[in-house]
Image: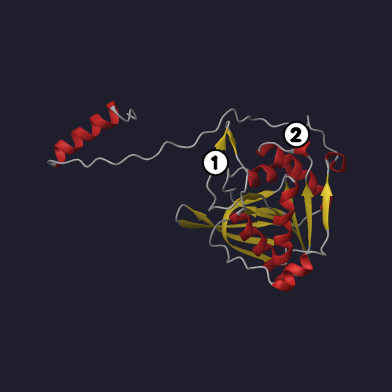
Amino acid sequence: MNILVVLKQTFDTEEKIVIQNGQISEDGVEFIINPYDEYAVEEAIKLKEEHGGEVTVVSVGPDRAESALRTALAMGADKAVLVDDESLFGDEYTTAKVLAAVAKKVGFDIIIGGQMAVDSGAGQGGPRLAEELGINHVSTAVKLEVDGNTVRVERDVEGDLEVVETSLPVLITAQQGLNEPRYPSLPGIMKAKKKPLERLSADDLGLTADAVKAKTEIVDQTLPAKKQAGRILTGDLAAQASELVQLLRNEAKVI
């Protein structure tokens, strides 16, 4: 089985966000594998252990993203691909186009990724990539079973479960609860240093910057306003309800 994992390197979730001149500062920041993508890596390795095959991890990003790929290799992935060409960096539209080109180049039976990236929270990566490749897509998986060409997925639907059956090739996005990602072992870390990591450019993928140009533009970024103390309403229920409506209308201006 040819298993492809798409992952992103993101800020460590414990990092403090600092914005300078409308841009997020990366000075001194610790980067990690996007937590949802860790579930994808683990599930891919489990599928390989059960069915055999090869796990390829892919990322689009700057040179520093190599460390995230090396971590995935240390966990048990077999090889990695990094697209570190700045002309191919952009929004979710751009990334989906680039990842589709990589997937077609390396081949796949199943693609697994995280259900969203914790930095953007867009949740567009998986569905967009599946559309680019013309394959089925099942999101927020909490259980995945593959039997021959048949794929059975239990997916989280806001606290309940939905069971979906489909067939290979397919793209799955991982939700928390799918598995418990393993820690890279010392032997795994040592082996990861010798595992192949291929770097690809626009020319390698037959792409041009214009063809994958971003459809959106970030014009400014600001931190949210500091939370203010709440207000406790008193009196009988009718009076509280009336006061609440007035506050929502006149102060919060949400009704």
Q: Can you say which quadrant of the picture contains the N terminus? A: bottom right
Residue 100, horizontal then vertical, whole percent: 76, 44
Q: Quadrant of residue 194?
A: bottom right
Q: Can you say which quadrant of the picture contains the C terminus? A: top left
Note whether 234 is above or below 22 in the view shown. Answer: below
Note whether 124 is above or below 214 in the view shown. Answer: below
Amino acid of disc 2: Val
Name the residue carrying label 1: 18
Q: Residue at x 16, y 41 (%)?
A: 234
Q: Work out how far the residue at label 2 is from the one at label 1, CA to CA, in angstroms.
A: 29 Å
Q: Secondary structure at mark 1?
A: loop
Name the residue carrying label 2: 212
**10 Å neighbourhood of mark 1: few (<14), some, or many (≥20)?**
some
Mark 2 or mark 1, which has the lower sequence index? 1
Amino acid of disc 1: Val
**10 Å neighbourhood of mark 2: few (<14), some, or many (≥20)?**
some
Q: Residue at x 55, y 33 (%)?
A: 221
Q: Quadrant of residue 32?
A: bottom right
Give the number of the mark in front: 2 or 1. 1
